Image (cartoon, rainbow, N blue to C red):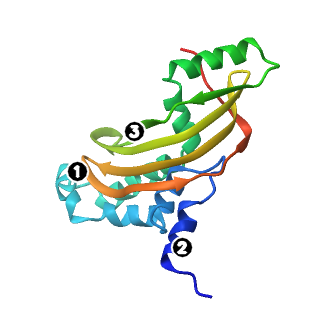
Amino acid sequence: MTETAEENRTKEATAVLTENMSIGDLFSLVSGGEAETDLKAGLGAEELTDLRKKVPKMISWSSVQEGVADSLAEAMHVSVLATLANGWKHYSKFMQDVRQSRSNPEMEIVSAIADHSIHSTLHPYVDVRLAGVKVHEIAFDVGLVTTIRGLLLSLKKGEIVSVELGECEWSGKIAVAEVDVLERKLKKLKLPGHLRLQHGIAIPLS
């Protein structure tokens, strides 16, 4: 029996969250394609004409493109869970539980966080240099919006050791010099009920 397009979309929407899932994996997941391939195509778009004009003519544009692509690739390999954890540390109730788990190192504490949204932005950049001297900086943003429903985090010794998620809605955008080169519209993802981490995510106390 041939699977319908709707069944394929459902499979994509229920893809498994793993400990090593990266931001690039999310961009690929919501489109069914290769995010880094799409990104490299976007970096050659005519929209970057203004950026090209700012780069000194004696500097190879292809080398600039390569530098931007490499730097963005590093950002795309950042862990999704680590990025979300950076947002969770702004919830006071969660941080109270982190402190309690540090005070009781033998105890595993479950912290429930209400439905919420996290706006995350990474700010990679590339220095354009001529004879070792910086002549231009190319800044870009990797932005994520994640709305999470049904979240339980297990804590031990101040680290997240397991995650239980119901579902989330996610969208993402990458911009180079304020020009959008890759965007993924809002997508609902159903995530598995429980994920035990092999390596805990440390939550520093401010």
Residue drawn 68% across the image and 21% down it: 158
Q: Which marked residue is nearer to the observer: mark 2 or mark 3?
A: 2
Residue at horizontal 31%, vertical 50%? 175
Q: Which residue is mark 2?
A: 8
Q: Which residue position is annotated with label 3?
A: 121
| Residue on which the image places disc 1 | 55
Which kind of residue does numbered mark 1 sit on? Val
Identify the element where label 3 is drawn. strand
* Residue at the (35%, 57%) spot, across then down: 183
Q: Is residue 135 above or below residue 46?
A: above
Residue in the foreground of this view, choosing between 192 and 40: 192
The residues bearing labels 2 and 3 have C-alpha atoms spaced at a distance of 30 Å
Neighbour class for label 1 at 10 Å: few (<14), some, many (≥20)?
A: some
Establish if 100 lies above or below 8.
above
Residue 24 in the image: x percent, y percent? 50, 55
- For the residues bearing labels 1 and 3, Cβ distance under 8 angstroms: no
Q: Could you tell me how far apart the alpha carbons at marks 1 and 3 are, in whole angstroms? A: 25 Å
Q: Nearer the viewer, mark 2 or mark 1?
A: 2
Q: Nearer the viewer, residue 192 or 99?
A: 192
Residue 56 position within the rendered picture, expressed as x and y whole percent measured from the top left: 21, 50
Question: Between disc 2 and disc 1, whose residue precedes?
Answer: 2
- Please give the name of the residue rendered at 21% of the width and 56% of the height, measured from the top-left corner: 52
Considering the numbered disc 2 on the image, is that residue within a helix, a strand or a loop?
Answer: helix
